[in-house]
Image: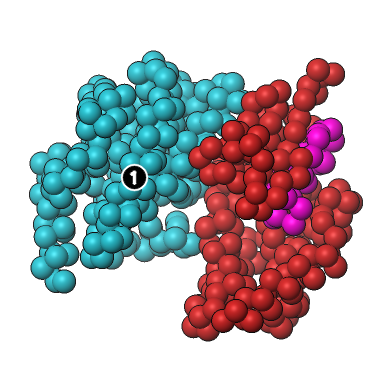
Chain colours: A cyan, B red
Amino acid sequence: MASNQEEVKLFGIVGSPFVTRVDIALNLKGVQYKYEEEKLGEFSDALIKYNPVYKKVPVLVHNDKPISESLVILEYIDEIWKQNPILPSDPYKRALARFWSKFIDDKCLNAARKVAFSLDEKEREEGFKELEVAFQFLEDELKDKFFGGEDIGLVDITGVFIAFWVPIMQEVIGLKLLTIEKFPKLYKWSQDFNNHQIVKETLPNRETQLAYFKARYESLFASK
Amino acid sequence: MASNQEEVKLFGIVGSPFVTRVDIALNLKGVQYKYEEEKLGEFSDALIKYNPVYKKVPVLVHNDKPISESLVILEYIDEIWKQNPILPSDPYKRALARFWSKFIDDKCLNAARKVAFSLDEKEREEGFKELEVAFQFLEDELKDKFFGGEDIGLVDITGVFIAFWVPIMQEVIGLKLLTIEKFPKLYKWSQDFNNHQIVKETLPNRETQLAYFKARYESLFASK
């Protein structure tokens, strides 16, 4: 448990799915932390000092010790604050949780980037197909209410961009991807996840994110 | 500790740095395992069944439960067999070990692939520069004999392709990259790592790897 002397800071950018992962984990654990908002392209000296390798958010600073990379941060949080575990205790289930979190980063994020931000029509279609394949794997993997069982865990938190940002993306672009018809279990999961009390209180404002994504998407094609 | 009923199988391909990571970890722990050699492009039905997502090696099967992705496997091995720990016990040091292992996968592997296998001269140069930057980070990070301290740990094992395969690559291509002049600490580390008793007994035959890499490199340019 956190002691009184403890200082926890999170360097982030509102609207970053990677930062939101860390926000959710800290809030699930009930950890008090100071949030430091960074600006894309104008990172503070502190951020660069704390993450000289990648120079990006999120960075968690716990008692002056910086940690980067969202999945690494999530494991650290789970090791330091034991309440409301994010990872299962069974080693095999832990391995599976790590595997599927990595899968989301490896297979879903790049594909979604192609769909959302590529100017090449063929590449966009390719990304869409990759996402369909990836979502089918996740659909098949989902056995309970959440990937973590009855409570949200590492895979759910990692998947926040699927639950929250993919629906925004498909609304702006006009895609049918994460729908109740195509992926009934994953769709229901996304609803349950977004409506989870802690998650709901942590997610950025949907309207703002929608407006941001719409503006970014339109400017992409305006500059084509 | 392993019980008598325990069955540990590793599906691999000799000469894969990813498989070699798992071999080293199992040998460090003194775990007896059955090695199943796969063929590139002709994976067995068992391999496809065990790793339907990526269809690649390594796959560790422990009492019929399959685990894929080398870094996920290494963490699993460390959780199941406690002797000769691969990860530090301190959470912050664990986070750093995870960070640098991920760094090797993210920043060194793709760059090395460009250097070794790209037909585009510019891309090869770009990969070379990326590797120099990455190696400088590792050089600065190396404080002790090994990344793990006096004993080898997660980052060392993940880095086997730097210690063992990069020197082979630079010999074949005629590069000066991991040299005593450029990266004295990292160079010494690579020697110490390759000469570590368990590692030395685990690494594939250097001459065979050299011949294989040479043939592959030459055929790449023959087909240009």
If the image is split into quadrants, where does the C terminus of chain B sit? bottom right
Q: Return the x and y of residue A3 as percentages of the image width and height.
A: 46, 28
Q: Position of residue B108 (x, y in %)?
A: 58, 64
Q: Which chain carries label 1?
A: A
Q: Residue drawn at (62%, 73%), measured in percent from left and top?
A: B116
Which residue: 48% across, 42% down?
A102
Q: Quadrant of residue A143?
A: top left
Q: Which of B71 and B208 lies nearest the eye of the viewer? A: B208
Out of A92 and B148, give the one closest to the viewer. Answer: A92
Q: Is residue B100 above or below residue B216?
A: above
Front residue of this view, candidates B68 and A3: B68
The quarter holding residue B160 reads bottom right
The range drawn in magenta is B13-35
In the rendered image, the vertical position of residue B145 relative to residue B120, given as above or below = above
In depth, the one of B61 and A146 nearer the eye is: B61
Neighbour class for label 1 at 10 Å: few (<14), some, many (≥20)? many
B123 relative position to B202: left or right:
left
Residue A118 can be seen in this image: no
Tag 1's secondary structure? helix
Q: Horizontal and vertical percent for residue A74?
A: 45, 37
Q: Quadrant of the N terminus of chain B?
A: top right
Instruction: State left or right for residue A108 relative to residue A174.
Output: right
Q: Where is residue A212 in the image (x, y as percent from the top left)?
A: 14, 52
Q: Name the residue under label 1.
A: A131
Q: Is residue B178 magenta?
A: no
Q: Which residue is drawn at 66% across and 76% down?
A: B219
Is residue A123 found left or right of A82 in the rendered image? Answer: left
Q: Residue at x 60, y 68 (%)?
A: B112
Q: Which amino acid does label 1 sit on?
A: Leu
The number of numbered badges drawn on the structure is: 1
Q: Can residue A215 be seen in this view?
A: yes
